[in-house]
Amino acid sequence: MTDPRIVYVVGCGHSGSTLLDMLVSTHSRIFSAGEAKMFRRQPDTVCTCGAERWQSCPFWKSVDERMRADGGPSLGHEDIEADDRDGFSGYNRRFFRAVSEESGCPVVLDSSKDFSRLKSFLNSDLRVDVIHLIRDPRGVAFSGLRKGRHIRGVSKKYVRTHVSAARALLDLPHIEVRYEDLARDPEREVARVVGFLGLEFESDQLAGWRRVERHNFGGNRMRLDDNETIKLDEAWRSEFSGWQRFSIWARTLPTRPRSRLGLALMRRLFG
Ligand SMILES: [Zn+2]
């Protein structure tokens, strides 16, 4: 049995990963599992198909049966985030294989975003293609503040996630996607991602992108509505004070410049 191709999205929360996930998985050969980590962390999450939890979704019930028939534990078992290499590789191989078989798609997307999960993938014997999703830190911070977080904490996490991911990916093939580019020109950015995965962009894949049958698990609540309009969210421009904008810009300086040379230098100094 061949392994499916796993595509992992790494980036900060509030970076538009649900939008990216839903747009890319309109391709007929790509299926989105959503945020796979959520099967363990929040198993009672509503599935995008409308099922109240994965146990009442026909798709995920079948995936669970396939995994158990493959000799492994049930969907949602803690092994999905196992610390040891063999435990992680074994569980995730069974998970992605079952999702690929059940969906009929050779490529499966996992938008969990966490750097720790990326590290586990890179440490495992699974092949993973990586999309590094980046949003302007002021946009990330503005969404974070609306959820009661503070500029200092959000900025720190932003730097940690992006510097760690960029360093881990320095010598590995990956693609960077900026939320702002995706929202401004979805077709161009999705075509770029699909091309990176070695697939042809399907000219009609974004037409009616909400009407695809979906079971992506976890993510922003936008996955549950049917609005097809894609609008760049830059509310921070008018809502933040000059001082707030400056403070976030200064605190996230280590994420710039993003050149290979800059990252190589950073690795030499701090690696
Ligand atoms: Zn479902």
Image: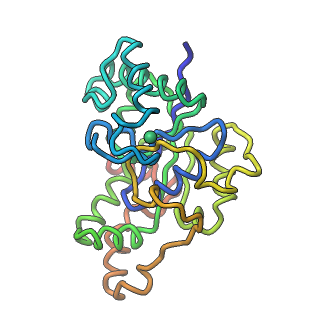
Task: Quadrant for the N terminus, please.
Answer: top right
The residue positioned 45% from the left and 52% from the top of the image is 263
- Side of 19 relative to 86 (left or right): right
From the top left corner, tell me how far across and down residue 209 is, in percent. 62, 54
Q: Quadrant of residue 4?
A: top right
Q: Nearer the viewer, residue 261 or 56?
A: 56
Scheme of colours in the image: rainbow
Query: Left of 260 or right of it: where is 56?
Result: left
Residue 98, above or below 175: above
* Residue at 39% from the left image edge and 48% from the top image edge: 113
Q: In which image quadrant can residue 199 be found?
A: top right
> Which residue reaches farthest right?
203
Q: Quadrant of the C terminus?
A: top left
Using the image as rendered, state which of residue 98 and residue 179 is in the foreground: 98
- Residue 258 spot, x, y in % from top left: 49, 59
| Frontmost residue, 236 versus 125 | 236
Q: Residue at x 56, y 44 (%)?
A: 213
Task: Indicate whether 73 appears above or below 212.
Answer: above
- Whether residue 225 is visible to the viewer of this picture, yes or no, is yes
Q: Does 219 sit above or below residue 252?
A: above
Q: Is residue 252 left or right of residue 264?
A: left
x and y percentages locating residue 28 in the rendered image: 66, 39
Can residue 167 be seen here? The reply is: no
Q: Residue 115, percent across and down? A: 35, 45
Query: Is 73 displayed left or right of 192 in the figure?
Result: left
